[in-house]
Amino acid sequence: MKNLELLAPVGDRERLEAAVYFGADAVYFAGKKFGLRALASNFDEEEIKVAVEYCHGHNVKVYITVNILAHNSDFVGMIDYLKYLDSVHVDGVIVSDLGIAHLVKEYTNLELHVSTQANITNKESAKVWVSLGAKRLVLARELNIKEIREIKDAIGDDVDIECFCHGAMCISYSGRCLLSNYFTGRDSNRGACAQPCRWKYALYSKNDQNPIDEYYPVEEDEHGTYILNSKDMCLIEHIKELAEAGIVSFKIEGRMKSTYYVATVVNAYRRAIDNYLRNLEPNFDYITELQKTSNRSFTTGFYFGSDQKTNKDSSLLAQTHDYVGIVIEDAKNGYALVEHRNKFVQGDELEVLSPNETFNKKILLTEIKDENGEPLTEVKKVKQRVYIKTDLDLKKNDILRKRNNRTL
């Protein structure tokens, strides 16, 4: 069996460093153009070069999304951009458009990965992409385990299978949606989705006898009203089944999600994959851990047959914990330098998010000092740096979180 890969989304440098620190084997992100997340921060060409150097220095691979469904005008500058990615030693490009795929093979030595936007749902399509030089297929989310295994058997061991294992799901077929185009003029298939599947909706009635439109709000109750709003995919409890189906790369969705989201999800899946590889039982509750960052509750999607509970009972994001600070320097002499992200006060109990042994350890804040050593009772200034007293061996980039009073 090939080594399993944990593939993490990153939208900027801070999230990239979090993904690497918390255990990603590879990351994927977009440049300033040609990707499907135009509203993410993304990376300019120099930032891509620096990111590749940083990741390769930590033995982490870098894949760049070039996965728009291109119009003629989109090809301006495309060849030069692909050549640049090749020159800075990007490990692969993720494409969905046949024309772009042709340019990748014609003008570069980049490894070709086929995006889920290409809607590969059968072994014949898979074999065609392989014949065109693809080295990895990101299969459609609508497949079940049996179909994935059949595709893997058909293409052999020289081509990898990558599948989404966690994150938000578009209600349209593998992401091909026109709602954003219709409502806002923003083309979701060229990177500018307005996410109308997350909006609230209402009914209007036009009465010819009454020139005033009647408005019927669609109110949410225990049965739910957000029919376009899918639950988040979560396969953390099914690593074994996915690996046995031939999946090599476990992909997390979320290039527009927060640093805290990336850290939490990567950390959880890193530990789950390692437990599977070592034949160990889970040593923490995976789902409870993932509920500590933003989610719309969870579903296994189509992997084990059609999930009739894919539509959520609420459109609201929920999480049990808030990200309050990040450790700036390794702790020493009983204190750690922490940079503020959300308010915390003396007397709070904080929890550590770390790839190290301090994971899920608690800190009772008995003492807080500013950088000049002056005592504080609360920290609420944006990115304020303070020292907190702790006996834990906190490391740079560890995250501190606090349980909130909101309910899922």
Image (tube, rainbow, N blue to C red):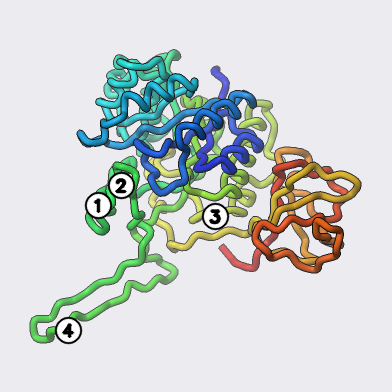
Q: Secondary structure at mark 2?
A: helix
SS for callout 4:
strand
Find disc 4 in the rendering and name its residue.
212
Above or below residue 192? Residue 152 is above
Which residue is labeled 3 in the image? 294
The alpha-carbon separation of the residues under discs 2 and 3 comes to 23 Å
Q: Position of residue 129 (x, y in %)?
A: 31, 21
Q: Are marks 1 and 2 in contact (CB under 8 Å)?
A: yes
Earlier residue among tags 4 and 2: 2
The quarter of the image holding the C terminus is: bottom right
Q: Amino acid at mark 1?
A: Asn
Residue at position x 49%, y 20% from top?
89
Calculate the distance from the C-alpha at mark 3 to the C-alpha at mark 4.
40 Å
Q: Is residue 79 in view from this perspective?
A: yes
Q: Which mark is residue 188?
A: 2
Question: How packed is label 2: few (under 14 Cα within 10 Å), some, or many (20 or more)?
Answer: many
For the residue labelled by badge 3, is the local secondary structure a helix, a strand or a loop?
loop
Q: Position of residue 105 (x, y in %)?
A: 33, 17
* Residue topped by disc 1: 181
In the rendered structure, which amino acid carries the disc numbered 3? Ser
Depth order, front residue of 399/219: 399
Q: Quadrant of residue 183?
A: bottom left
Q: CA distance from mark 4 to mark 1?
A: 28 Å
